[in-house]
Image (tube, grey):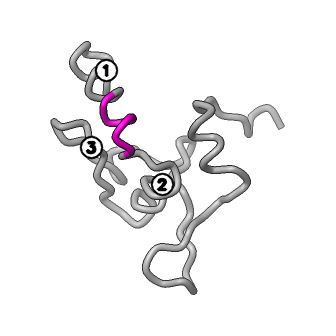
Amino acid sequence: MLENLAYSCSICNEFKGTDIATVLDDPSHPVRFFNPRKDKWDEHFEVEDSAKINPKSLVGAATVKIFNLNHPDSIIERRGLMQLGLYP
């Protein structure tokens, strides 16, 4: 089971909880989250110069939503990392 573990910050882990999907526009069609082991980041997300993460797919939209990736504090932190050349 160790191969199923993934590093994540405690905030993201709390947002996700035990969920594996979320509902976007159509409540009858849950959308799974981005899987870093199987999915390619660039297919699901793009990062603006402002440090905002924009989804490029339904999987990206579900992930941005559930993990609250564009919370103002996250954007501030990401912008600082970008200025230091540490992100992406």
Compared to residue 34, the image places residue 6 above or below, namely above
Circle 2 — which element? helix
Magenta stretch: includes residue 1: no
Q: Which amino acid does label 2 sit on?
A: Thr
User: Where, quadrant-wise, is the C terminus in this rendering?
Assistant: top left
User: Disc 3 and disc 2: Cα gap in Å?
Assistant: 14 Å
* Residue that protrudes farthest toward the right in the picture: 1
Q: Residue at x 55, y 81 (%)?
A: 29
Q: Residue at x 57, y 86 (%)?
A: 28
Residue 46 screen position, x and y as percent: 27, 46
Q: How crowded is mark 1: few (under 14 residues within 10 Å), some or many (20 or more)?
A: some
Circle 3 — which element? loop
Instruction: Please tell me the numbered disc located at residue 52.
Output: 3
Q: What stretch is highlighted in magenta?
A: 71-76
Q: Which amino acid does label 1 sit on?
A: Leu
Read off the residue under disc 1.
Answer: 81
In front here: 4 or 67? 67
In front here: 27 or 57? 27
Q: Which residue is drawn at 25% across and 23% down?
A: 82
Read off the residue under disc 2.
Answer: 63
Q: How crowded is mark 2: few (under 14 residues within 10 Å), some or many (20 or more)?
A: many
Question: Picture quarter containing residue 19?
Answer: bottom right
The residue mark sitting in front, 3 or 2, is 3
Q: What residue type is labelled 3?
A: Lys
Mark closest to the chain's N terminus, 1 or 2: 2
